[in-house]
Image (cartoon, coloured by chain):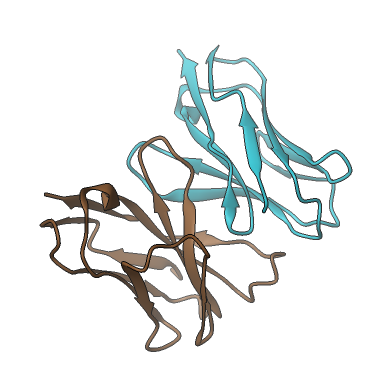
Amino acid sequence: KQEVTQIPAALSVPEGENLVLNCSFTDSAIYNLQWFRQDPGKGLTSLLLIQSSQREQTSGRLNASLDKSSGRSTLYIAASQPGDSATYLCARPGYFGTGTSLTVIP
Amino acid sequence: DAMVIQNPRYQVTQFGKPVTLSCSQTLNHNVMYWYQQKSSQAPKLLFHYYDKDFNNEADTPDNFQSRRPNTSFCFLDIRSPGLGDAAMYLCATSRDGTGKETQYFGPGTRLLVL
C-alpha cells in the first residue's frame, strides 16, 4: 500500500523567508505527484502537478521537485508571505500525506 | 468556469438518519472520487468511479455507498451516519484515471452528526 509522509507537520517562519516542505512516498511507480493547498475548513486547491517523467515544476514563487529514485518530493516557497499560511498536502493518486501546517508571521 | 461543485457546503444530520451528499462537474471528466477528511487528518479515498465502473477501497465501511447516474453527477450516500462519520467530504475529478493527470477538487461538504 502506498504511504505518503510529510515533514515537518508544522512550520512557522517570518515573512520573506524561503522555505522547503518535504514529502516522501513508498511507491516509486509511474504516477504523478501533486501538491495542494488547504485553508482552514476549505477544500483543496491544486498548486503544482509533477508528471512521473518530470523532475520539477514551477509556478510563480513555488517550485516543486520530484526524485523517484529516493521517493521524495519537495515544495520550495520563495519570499514567503502571510497569505501563504495554510496546510500544504502532497499526494500520489488516491493517497495523501498528512500535510504541513505553515504559518508565515508578518 | 468549468469546475467541481458540491452541495450542500454544510450538512447536519441526526445519528442513524440517512444522508446524501452531491457532487457535479462541468469538466466532462471520466473519473470522480470521494474522499473523507477528518479533522487534522489527510483525505482518505473512499471510492471512485471510472465512467460507470465503481471501485471501492478495501477499508471503506459498508455504510458508505455511491451512485453515478451520469457523467456529470456523483452522490455519496451514508446509510446510517454515526458520530464518527462527522468529517469533510471531498469530491474530485480527473480526466482519465491513469494517475498521470491533475485531480480537481470541489470545496467539500462538512457533515455534522448530532
Q: Quadrant of the C terminus of chain A?
A: top left
Which sits in the foreground, A10 or B55? B55
x and y, in percent, of residue B84 in the image: 27, 48
x and y, in percent, of residue B65 in the image: 35, 73
Left or right, residue A76 beside residue A70: left
x and y, in percent, of residue B26 in the image: 44, 76
| Residue at point 52%, 65% (across, down) | B57
Relative height, residue A90 to residue A21 (above, below): below
Q: Colour of chain B?
A: brown
Relative height, residue B101 to residue A54 (above, below): below
Which sits in the foreground, B30 or A13? B30
Q: Quadrant of residue B64?
A: bottom left
| Residue at point 46%, 27% (across, down) | A85
State how many labels appear: 0
Relative height, residue B111 to residue A10 (above, below): below
| Residue at point 77%, 57% (across, down) | A51
The cyan chain is A
Which sits in the foreground, B45 or B32? B45
